[in-house]
Amino acid sequence: SSTLPSALSVSYRSAFLPATQQTTAGDAVITTDINFTITGLNDSAEAMYGYNAGDVIGINLMTLLDFELVGISHKDAIETLFKEGFWKGDLIYFHKKRKLVYNSSCTLMRDATGNPTMIIISTRTISEKLRHEKLLAVEQSKLQSLLGSFSETMLFRSFMKNSPTLGWIYDETGTLVYGNPTFLDILGLPPDMGKKNIAEFTSSPEVLNKILKRNNQVLRTGQPIITEDEFADKNGVMRHYLSYCFLLPVSDHNKLVGGHAVEITDTKKSRREI
């Protein structure tokens, strides 16, 4: 049975909600604190999401339910909710290998002094036709994003192919998926080598750890990094480079680290730093 306060268990039509935010008795209603920890849900919510109220009270909504919002990130939706006091949109709920599309609205409740105290989330089903339209729209959006990022990656490769500076792309596992001709020549790697893990073309644990650490930082933060690097070329000559590494997001689940470097060996020698 419902664990919502009696004023909310049947309907949202109460004095403290504006008319534009009213919901009906059939809506699935969940209440949470301002950190999205569940404090109650009605019978419709139990049926919609497949959980008993007694099992989920005290659990964070964001970790309990696997869902994504249509056309907006979780972060932006939450910012809108806390800034404007209300957010409304569509969500896709992943449940038992199914994609269920719902229309949802969130209301931020405040006390008499204006401090936020509770979030009320009301969700309702939408028509089958509209459900398919929204699923298609989401997939098209993901495809456009993927193609756009892929085009940017190909443009980067084309640019770096003719660049006198070193250029490279690593994946998340530390595998070199691309090296421009200058990069491959300096390291003595064959042009047709294909993908190769860092450990396969450097015998220096120090260089290996530095590259992996730098790549992981870019992947974790999304921010570019500038470093000064020293390593031996294919002839064993020590060279110095100023490197710039940055994120190449191919998709939500696939990210690459791109980079290029300018040699500064002669500059350092002229300054008698080596």
Image (tube, rainbow, N blue to C red):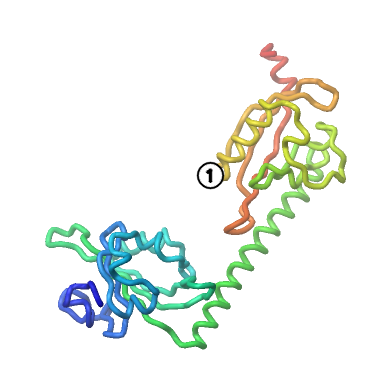
Which residue is at 68% across, 28% downward?
207
Quarter that holds the N terminus: bottom left
Which residue is at 33% across, 60% downward?
59
Rendered position, 195 above or below 44: above
Q: Nearer the viewer, residue 235 or 174?
A: 174
**Image location of residue 98, percent across then percent down:** 52, 75
Residue at the far left: name it: 112
Report whether 89 appears left or right of 160: left
Q: Nearer the viewer, residue 86 or 132?
A: 132
* Residue 83 appears in view: no
Residue holding disc 1: 220
Quarter that holds the C terminus: top right
Which residue is at 28% across, 60% downward?
58
**Image location of residue 26, percent across then percent down:** 31, 85
**Image location of residue 252, percent across then percent down:** 57, 58
Amino acid on which disc 1 is placed: Arg
* Residue 121 appears in view: yes
Quarter where residue 257 is shown: top right
Rendered position, 87 above or below 214: below
Quarter where residue 186 is shown: top right
Report whether 37 appears left or right of 204: left
